[in-house]
Image: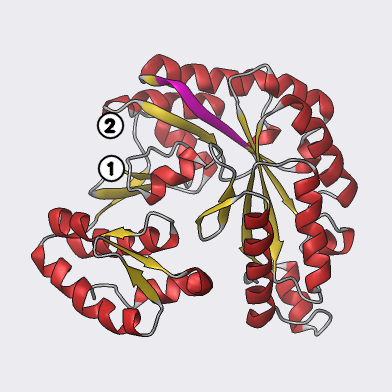
Amino acid sequence: MIQALAQEIEMRKEELDEEVETIYFGGGTPSVLEIDEINFLIEQVYYHYKVSETPEITLESNPDDLTTEKIIALSKTKINRLSIGIQSFFEEDLKMMNRAHNAYQAKSCLEAAVKHFDNITIDLIYGIPNMSNEKWLQNIQMALNFGIPHISSYALTVEPKTALKKLIEKGEISKPKDEVAENHFFILVEKLKEKGFIHYELSNFGKEGYFSKNNTSYWLGKKYIGIGPSAHSYNGTHRSWNIANNSIYIKEINNGKLPAEIEKLSVSDRYNEYIMTGLRTIWGVSLERIKSEFGQKYYDYLIKSSDKLLSKGLLESNGQILSISQKRKFLSDGIASELFFV
């Protein structure tokens, strides 16, 4: 697999003329990789692409993979940002979500990580059944106690064919409630604002200078190349995704073929994506960009369709930027869908 990843990195080097600003190991559990494997893949990117002088290089990881020894070893690589899937600091929550790590590992890996990495982000889940507002505040406070400069937080979703789904169907756990999730969301917003975090995207909060460059690139519509099974790529007009099957992926790469499907995005597709991502961020939707990139038709459509949302206080406008008011942030995706060009 490592050799196939390296081969794909080389095969696709002509696709990107721009400087590489971020390298992101994610979409699974890349922290199971050995240090020399991580170094090898980073070296391949540096060899085949032009990389900026100060790239953000992130490793997604689970607490159970991050021993003190592993963290120290990672700190000696070019990895300069850790994304750790904490989810919760409470044992009962982790068991309910069927996480591989426990509460002790969640805390101990952070104790070690903050000694060796400055740029750390963690994931926290809210809206968990039977989680009181007080318990959710304790979760947030524990993260703050570690001095973490970035937090990504998401509402609990129940996926089909999961242990959580079965427990809910059996009546052993209550179904997550939207009103609980909304309360937790606003508690999170207020608490992190009080501590100097900027709510720069619906699910992301960062101290000044610690916004995720990788994720921000997606939201701003920059090009990216995804390497490996199931990885997605975007070049501004087309989206592609690699086959999910590992053995077929390796076989095709070894035969010099890229096992990917490609979709050409229509103007409407690109407009809708910009509306969706723009409204989730503090940068909002630029009316000038709508006019210059998508044309007068889409500009007129947006102006007309946003009128009722502005009158209801769901949207705000300064004449140049459309954004969602802070009190309505939790409804961002639903508000955005009202503006889609169908």
Q: Amino acid at mark 1?
A: Asn
Percent position of residue 17, x then y = 26, 27
Q: Which residue is mark 1?
A: 235
Residue 148, x across and y down, in percent: 70, 42
Residue indicated by mark 2 = 15
- For badge 2, the amino acid type reads Glu
Q: Nearer the viewer, residue 105 or 10?
A: 105
Quadrant containing the C terminus is bottom left
Distance in Å between CA atoms under marks 2 and 1? 8 Å
| Left or right, residue 138 beside residue 331 | right
Q: Is residue 3 above or below residue 299?
A: above
Q: Residue at x 40, y 21 (%)?
A: 51
Instruction: Give the residue displayed 29% in from the left and 73% down from the top.
Output: 340
Residue span colored magenta: 52-59
Classify residue 253 as left or right of residue 93.
Answer: left
Q: Is residue 338 above or below residue 91?
A: below
Residue 189 visible in the displayed image: yes
Give the residue at x 51% y 61%.
202
In the foreground, 150 or 20: 150
Determine whether, in the image, residue 68 is placed left or right of residue 302.
right
Identify the element where label 2 is drawn.
helix
Front residue of this view, candidates 186 and 335: 186
168 lies left or right of 188: right
Residue 254 visible in the shown view: no
The mark that comes first in sequence, 2 or 1, is: 2
Q: Quadrant of residue 105?
A: top right
